[in-house]
Amino acid sequence: MDFLCKPDLIVSDSVAYWGKLMAMKFHIPYVPSTTTFAFHQYSARYMKHGIGELFKMLFSMPKIRKQIKKLQEKGYPVKGILDIVQNDNETLYL
């Protein structure tokens, strides 16, 4: 992808991973907009817990690795899923 004018900065929601991926690929500074959820004493009831969720996550890992490999083949400098979802202490946030 060629930019007519390369942006100085990419800002995207922290779960909009494509913003971070574009910043990584084209060496553009990235700032995630990180929101939080409103929790109360009943929120945990809505979240699934248990061995079933653990197995779903484990069985999805080969698919995730396949997608990571596709990103690498397209020139994205991603080593694993944490590169996409995790930020370091140097990252600025909104």
Image (cartoon, rainbow, N blue to C red):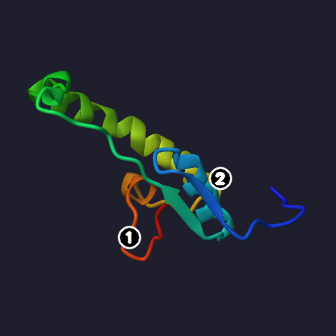
Residue that appears at 49% across and 42% down: 67
Q: Residue at x 58, y 48 (%)?
A: 18
Q: Amino acid at mark 1?
A: Asp
| In front: label 1 or label 2 | 1
The numbered mark, 1 or 2, whose residue comes first in the sequence reads: 2
Q: Is residue 8 left or right of residue 90?
A: right
Q: Which residue is mark 2?
A: 74
**Which quadrant of the structure image shows residue 4?**
bottom right
Residue 69 in picture, x, y percent from top left: 51, 49
SS for callout 2:
loop
- Image: 58 above or below 65: above
Residue occupying the point 66% across, 69% down = 28
Secondary element under disc 1, as helix, strand or loop, is loop
How far apart, in angstroms, are the residues tagged by discs 1 and 2?
24 Å
Q: Label 1: how many residues lie within 10 Å, few (<14), some (14-19) or many (20+)?
A: few
Residue 23 % position (x, y): 62, 62
**Amino acid at dot 2:** Lys
Residue farthest along the bottom direction in this orientation = 90
Looking at this rendering, what residue extends furthest in the right direction?
Answer: 4
> Relative to 66, is 28 above or below?
below
Judge from the rendering whether residue 66 lies leftward or rightward of residue 39; answer left or right.
Answer: right
Asked whether the beta carbons under mark 1 and mark 2 sit within 8 Å of each other, the answer is no
Query: Is residue 71 shown left or right of residue 8?
Result: left
Quadrant where the N terminus lies?
bottom right
Q: Residue at x 64, y 61 (%)?
A: 10
- Which x, y percent locates residue 20? 55, 56
Nearer to me, 5 or 76: 5
Residue that badge 1 annotates: 88
Q: Dot 2, how many residues are within 10 Å of its Cα: few (below 14), some (14-19), or many (20+)?
A: few
How far across and how far down the image is residue 19, in percent?
60, 52
Numbered disc total: 2
